[in-house]
Image (cartoon, helix red, strand yellow):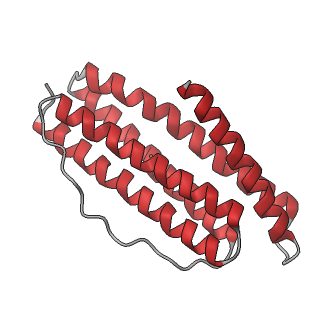
């Protein structure tokens, strides 16, 4: 059993994960428009991943005999200045989500809700990995540089990183 307050907080997190899924979908679309197919693939996969994050909480709430609500999702921005800005915004967004997860952990602790605290540990680890991934990509972008000649190499680099992330996920699922 989880409290009314926890049910509400988890439903808010469902909304945040849904927004992240749509934000990354918008970024995938922008990347495709720029001809950055490697970056687009990266964000399409990230978008799917965020939907999975949302569904995991959704199922947990219902499993705990509460009511998971389908969220209203705000339209994310569609215009970006550069590929670097896209990844900077992604990192900033992931840091916000990390804080939201930490707040949920604090609430679970305050309520002595051990089941939810345990459930949230998966998200704590996931956030650590996602922030690390975005920082690594931003470091690579800085190394490659951002002139028009660099975009092709940035895109290839992100494509390779995406393939590695995907292979790792498939390995974990197997
Ligand atoms: Fe589910 Fe990337 O936060």
Query: Where is residue 158 drawn, in percent x and y?
Result: 73, 55
Residue 87 in view (yes/no): no
At x 51% / y 31%, what residue is drawn?
125
Query: Where is residue 91 drawn, in percent x and y?
Result: 58, 55
The image quarter containing residue 102 is top left
> Which quarter of the rendered picture does the N terminus lie within?
top left
Query: Where is residue 120 drawn, in percent x and y?
Result: 37, 30
At x 80% / y 58%, what residue is drawn?
156
At x 84% / y 63%, what residue is drawn?
153
Residue 77 in view (yes/no): yes
At x 80% / y 70%, what residue is drawn?
151
In the image, residue 51 above or below residue 127: below
Q: Is residue 155 left or right of residue 105?
A: right
Count of labels shown?
0
Query: Where is residue 145 drawn, in percent x and y?
Result: 85, 67
The image quarter containing residue 42 is bottom right
The one nearer the camera, 3 or 43, is 43
In the image, residue 169 above or below residue 96: above
> Which quarter of the rendered picture does the C terminus lie within?
top right
In the image, residue 78 above or below residue 121: below
Q: Is residue 150 left or right of residue 73?
A: right
Q: Is residue 167 left or right of residue 29?
A: right
């Amino acid at each position: 059993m989880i409290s009314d307050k926890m049910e509400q907080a988890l439903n808010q997190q469902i909304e945040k994960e849904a927004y992240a899924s749509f934000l990354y979908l918008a970024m995938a679309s922008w990347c495709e428009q720029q001809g950055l197919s490697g970056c687009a693939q990266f964000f399409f996969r990230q978008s799917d991943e965020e939907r999975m994050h949302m569904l995991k909480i959704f199922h947990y709430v219902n499993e705990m005999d509460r009511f998971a609500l389908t969220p209203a999702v705000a339209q994310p921005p569609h215009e970006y200045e550069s590929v670097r800005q896209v990844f900077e915004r992604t990192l900033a967004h992931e840091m916000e989500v990390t804080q939201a997860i930490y707040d949920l952990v604090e609430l679970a602790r305050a309520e002595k809700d051990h089941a939810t605290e345990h459930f949230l540990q998966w998200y704590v680890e996931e956030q650590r990995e996602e922030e690390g991934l975005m920082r690594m990509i931003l470091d690579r972008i800085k190394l490659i540089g951002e002139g028009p000649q660099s975009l092709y190499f940035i895109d290839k680099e992100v494509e390779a990183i995406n393939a590695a992330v995907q292979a790792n996920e498939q390995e974990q699922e197997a």
